[in-house]
Amino acid sequence: MKTDTREKILSAGASIVLHKGFNHTGIQEILKASGVPKGSFYFYFNSKEDFGLELIDFYQKLISSGVEKYGRNKPDDPVSKLRQMFEWSFKVLEQNNYKGGCPIGNLSLEMADINENFRIKLSESISMIKNRIRELIEQAKQQNLLDGSLDAQMLSDFIFSSWEGTLLLMKVSKSTAPQESFFTVLFQTILQPFSRAVKNEAS
Amino acid sequence: MKTDTREKILSAGASIVLHKGFNHTGIQEILKASGVPKGSFYFYFNSKEDFGLELIDFYQKLISSGVEKYGRNKPDDPVSKLRQMFEWSFKVLEQNNYKGGCPIGNLSLEMADINENFRIKLSESISMIKNRIRELIEQAKQQNLLDGSLDAQMLSDFIFSSWEGTLLLMKVSKSTAPQESFFTVLFQTILQPFSRAVKNEAS
């Protein structure tokens, strides 16, 4: 029962914070949206900060399970898996009329400078995502789907950054164009060096 | 005199909003930091929103003049000019102990969904930056510094996104590593297709 109510508060809070930011969201607002009686917040969380830190885990799980569900019954080679991570996030953003974006990226910009506990927790969350990207690139290299000389560590930084920036650009332009630029440059230039080399050679 | 005081308020506000976000910053706080008497804010701005919209122009000018100053007496071919835009921004971030980041990116994530006037103004500001990137790539293509087949429009989206994401990642990790990944992937893979093609051919 206690767990259910906690989840309800986190779930309602996740949606509001995604759209309004953490500092701009009030506890009463979250309780109202979750249908939990006023004043019971501190029965479930020690503080608003404590709630926010748990929210980061909550978002992380939402992302993992969303990507996993989206990729079911789709090609499961590592390059396709990588593509599906991005496709899923862009699809969610489109479904939300380009509102919200990446909760981890949003909280990073909002909180990294003003709360060290948030910053550390967000860094850990980002490392998990970057590790997943690195792992898929390593697997793709092993399976000769990508050039073996690619630096997976460096690329995981770069690709995570490009992805976050693309979500930002889609959110502010309310347009799908940045997504097309992302897929084209990433999969036709950065992650297709062999075919590109051949193309340049032939032209 | 009126202009001076306006500038003082904008300048003090720019620094506070960069670090705390727009919604989290109070008008009294800005006035205090700028040494302007309490209560005189509405003599200079119609509303907090009006102030925020002017702040976007103020940031845009800061960026342009910062990049321009940084690039003086440095190589002025278009590829170097492009690199200097990024170098300048990373240098500023490092000097600020990885706090702050890109004011335009920060405000985009914070405000794009909740205030349409901000969103439009931020989009215009981002378009100006992307146009500058596109222009430099076009010039580099014309001077045979870059592969003529590169799609400058698409690359301006992609590079802007990667740049913003890199600033985000530096801000949250308080580290310079994402910057190195950015320069390496951007200038050795994306914007150096000829040398890469030759390298692949030779190996």
Image (spheres, coloured by chain):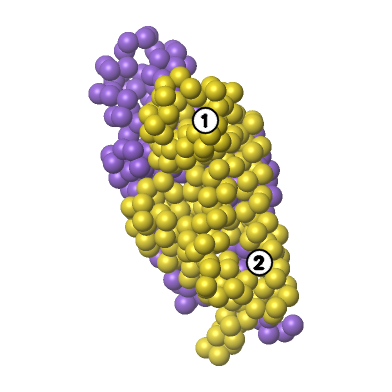
Chain colours: A yellow, B purple
Residue B156 in view of the camera? no
Label 2 neighbourhood size at 10 Å, few (<14), some (14-19), many (20+)?
many
Nearest the eye: B75 or A129: A129
Q: Is residue B100 above or below residue A183?
A: above
**Chain of the residue displaying label 2:** A
User: Image point 44% across, 71% down: which residue?
Assistant: B151
Q: Amino acid at mark 2?
A: Leu
- Describe residue B86's horizontal placement relative to residue B112 as left or right: right
Label 1 neighbourhood size at 10 Å, few (<14), some (14-19), many (20+)?
many
**Chain of the residue displaying label 1:** B
Nearest the eye: B17 or A35: A35
Do labels 2 and 1 touch, CB within 8 Å? no
- SS class, disc 1: helix
The numbered disc on residue B19 is: 1
Report the mark closest to the observer, 2 or 1: 2
Q: Position of residue B89 (x, y in %)?
A: 55, 44
Q: Is residue A190 above or below residue B36?
A: below
| Displayed quadrant of residue B99 | top right
- On whether disc 2 and disc 1 are found on a single subunit, the reply is no
- Describe residue B3's horizontal placement relative to residue A127 as left or right: left
The numbered disc on residue A131 is: none
The residue that disc 2 covers is: A136
Give the distance between the C-alpha atoms of the residues marked 2 and 1, in whole angstroms. Answer: 35 Å
Residue A129 in view of the camera? yes
User: Image point 48% across, 22% down: which residue?
Assistant: A40
- SS class, disc 2: helix
* Farthest-out residue, front: A1
| Displayed quadrant of residue A19 | top left
User: Image point 28% across, 24% down: which residue?
Assistant: B47
User: Image point 74% across, 82% down: which residue?
Assistant: B203
Q: Position of residue B149 (x, y in %)?
A: 47, 77
